[in-house]
Image: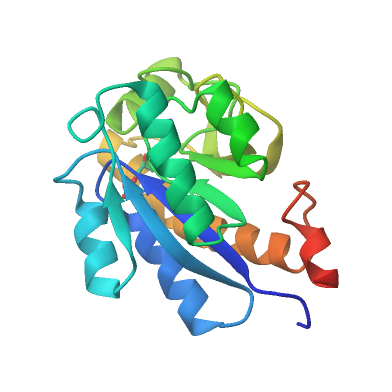
Amino acid sequence: MTGKMLRVAVFASGTGTNLSAIVDAARSAPGFFAVALVIVSRADAGAGARAAAAGIPCAHISSATHATAAERDDAMLELLAAHRVDLIALAGYLKRISPYFIARFGKPILNIHPALLPEFGGQGMYGCRVFEAVLASGAKASGVTIHLVDEQYDHGPIVFQEAIAVLDGDTVESLAARTQALEHRAYPLVLRRIAEGEIDVGGGGSDRRSG
Ligand code: GAR
C-alpha cells in the first residue's frame, strides 16, 4: 500500500474487546491503519485499561471531567486534531454524537452494532438488550452492522452488514459470543478496506491513497 496510514480514534464506554481486535489487527498487518487515540466516557471502562496496556494514548471525557456537552465536544475535537485522527470508530460508545461534533470533525465516524440494523437498534439498545430483543422477536437471523454515524443512535448509511443464523436453543450468551466473534473480524476488515480505498466513506477514506 502506498497511501498514508489511516489514523483511527476508538471511542468506547465498556469492555473494549472491539478495541483490542482493532489494535491487534492493526499491529499484525501494519501500514493500513493504526489506533492513534482512545477516548472513553467512563473512567472505569475496560477499554481504558486495554488502551493503557497497548501503550495507546487514552483520555476519559465525560460529565465528570467537563461540565457541559459543548466543553466535552471541544475537548474531544482538540485531542482528535492533536493526534491527527482521520476516522473515529465507535465501539460500544454509549454517548450520542452531537451534530456540532459531527460537523466540526468533518471526517468519517463509524459505529458497530451487534444486530442487523435498522432492526434492534436505537437509544438504550446495546449489550444484552440487543440479543434479548433478537431472541424475543423469533428472528431466524441476526448479525453485525457497521455504519456511518449521524445524530441518531445506531443510524446512518450502512457500510458493512453480515448475517449469522439464530440457532434453536440460542441464549443471550451464545448469540452474543457468535456475534462478538463476527464483530472482531468485521471491524478490522472494514477499516482495512477503507484504508485501501475499497470502501468509500468520504473524506479520509480512499482520498488518503493520493496523500
Ligand atoms: C459491541 O458488541 C458493540 O457492537 C456494542 O457494544 C459492544 C461493545 O463491546 N454497541 C452497541 O450495541 C451500539 N448500539 P466491547 O466494549 O467489548 O467492544
Image coordinates for residue 118, horizontal then vertical, percent: 60, 22
Q: Is residue 37 left or right of residue 61?
A: right
Residue at (53, 53) in percent of width and height:
81
The total number of labels drawn is 0
The image quarter in which residue 175 lies: top left
Residue at (51, 49) in percent of width and height:
89
Would residue 95 be seen by someone viewing this image from the given angle? Answer: no
Furthest residue toward left: 44
Residue 120, above or below 101: above
Q: Nearer the viewer, residue 207 or 165?
A: 207
Q: Is residue 120 left or right of residue 67?
A: right
Q: Nearer the viewer, residue 1 or 25?
A: 1
Image coordinates for residue 210, horizontal then vertical, percent: 85, 71
Residue at (48, 28) in percent of width and height:
97
Image coordinates for residue 190, horizontal then vertical, percent: 64, 57
Residue 80, above or below 100: below
Q: Nearer the viewer, residue 138 or 52?
A: 52
Would residue 6 be seen by someone viewing this image from the given angle? Answer: yes
Colouring used for the render: rainbow
Rendering quadrant holding ligand 1? top left
Image coordinates for residue 178, horizontal then vertical, percent: 40, 50
Residue 51, above or below 96: below
Q: Is residue 194 left or right of residue 167?
A: right
Residue at (76, 82) in percent of width and height:
1
Q: Quadrant of the C terminus?
A: bottom right
Residue 92, above or below 53: above
